[in-house]
Image (cartoon, rainbow, N blue to C red):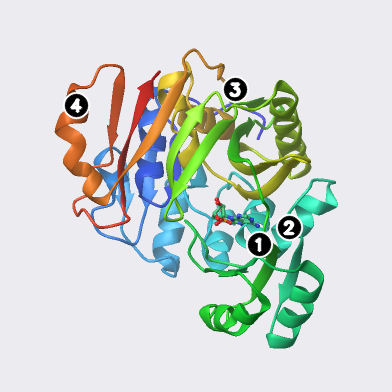
Amino acid sequence: MTNPLPTGATIGILGGGQLGRMLSVAAARLGLRSHIYEPGANPPAADVAHATTTAPYDDAAALTAFARSVDLVTYEFENIPTEALDIIEAITPIHPNRRALGTSQDRLVEKNFLQGIGLNVAPFADITDAASLDAAITTIGTPAILKTRRFGYDGKGQARLKSPQDAATALADMAGAPAILEGFVSFTAEISIIAARNPQGEVACYDPGENIHRDGILHTTTVPAKIPARLRTDAVLLAAKILNTLDYVGVMGVELFVTPQGLIVNEIAPRVHNSGHWTQNGCAVDQFEQHIRAIAGWPLGDGSRHSDVTMENLIGKDMDKVPALAREANCALHLYGKVETKAGRKMGHVNRIT
Ligand code: AMP
């Protein structure tokens, strides 16, 4: 893509959740339109998008019509079926590209990629059966985590092994799905860096945020992360290396473990990321606008942090706190308009300027 997308153009977004919703709002602010493709009814993004297609990812006719109605396609989640992408890509460009998506969809491919470009990852091994798991436990040791190669998110599809005796139960938890064993990293903190790259090859990174998880789900992200300047620089450099190698266009979230030996890459997400929501109230240009700018071939915006922020997710019953949060000073409320409140479901978040 050489020419920037003009205002009035339409961006297709695969997935109609909160990320698609916030991308649509950002696109609208830049005078662009968005068209959501989502199988489920009442997607949060449909409230704010110009158009919505409600159809499954195996509906070739709906995918074709969707692709023809937009100027380019992006996505808010990784697990999009390959066949759907093939149909779309024959008609219109997809950003971030298929290589980035393919790399992040499979933990084994992802680990090999990251290691191949010289980055540190947890010790890992491909697990196909009980024998390969036993062999991996011998080399990697315990504690360790067995993770499905595909379709894992928010800590799902994972089993912890405290000792080699846990092998059989952990393997049963995978229900026959291809998996990897990862050595347990004794980290001092978890941070993430949100990075952006445009087709011209410009790269911009937000300040790394420090993440706290509860029950496997992100609870808070705080900026600035309490890490030495040296590690902040390392995070920026390694993110830029990942984006450049993938010839990436868009925003990516890179999750990192901080250890006494330096940074270890946990995983990459080829999309806007929950741990980047603080940018909405901490920067002139947030991660959603930055993603739209990047995929539209616009100059990247100013993502320097003007405020210290703590982002807190509102999950399930946290919605009961909304009346009190609405009265709180220096607290920006972001609700996703989800019809049904369920335990473990991300309903919104707040950004507290600290
Ligand atoms: P993931 O889905 O891979 O991001 O894992 C979810 C969470 O589990 C991470 O944010 C960490 O808190 C923890 N975790 C995952 N992998 C490891 C590991 N190899 N060592 C220690 N903790 C881990």
What is the x, y in percent for residue 343? 27, 57
Q: Secondary structure at mark 4?
A: helix
The residue wearing badge 2 is 111
Of labels 3 and 4, the one closer to you: 4
Q: Amino acid at mark 2?
A: Lys
| x, y percent for residue 277 | 44, 33
Name above or below for residue 249 compared with residue 44: above
Check residue 107 in the rendering and tell me which mark sits there, or answer none.
Answer: 1
Is label 4 or label 1 in front? Answer: 4
Q: Quadrant of residue 165?
A: bottom right
Per the model, the C-alpha gap separating discs 4 and 1 is 40 Å
Image location of residue 38, percent across then percent down: 36, 56
**Amino acid beneath label 1:** Arg
Above or below 109: residue 218: above
Dot 3 and dot 2 residues touching (CB under 8 Å): no
Q: Secondary structure at mark 3?
A: loop
Identified by mark 4, the residue type is Ala
Describe the element under mark 1 as helix, strand or loop: helix
* Mark 1 touches mark 2? (CB < 8 Å): yes
* The C terminus: image quadrant: top left
Q: Which residue is mark 4?
A: 326
Q: Residue furthest top?
A: 306
Instruction: Decide if ligand 1 comes within 8 Å of the CB at mark 4.
Output: no
Q: Is residue 261 left or right of residue 31?
A: right
As rendered, which of 97 and 325 lies closer to the eye?
325
**Which residue in the structure is indicated by mark 3?**
300
Q: Residues within 10 Å of mark 4 (few under 14, many from 20)?
A: few
Q: Nearer the viewer, mark 1 or mark 3?
A: 1
Q: Report the residue at 79% width, 80% height from top.
A: 135
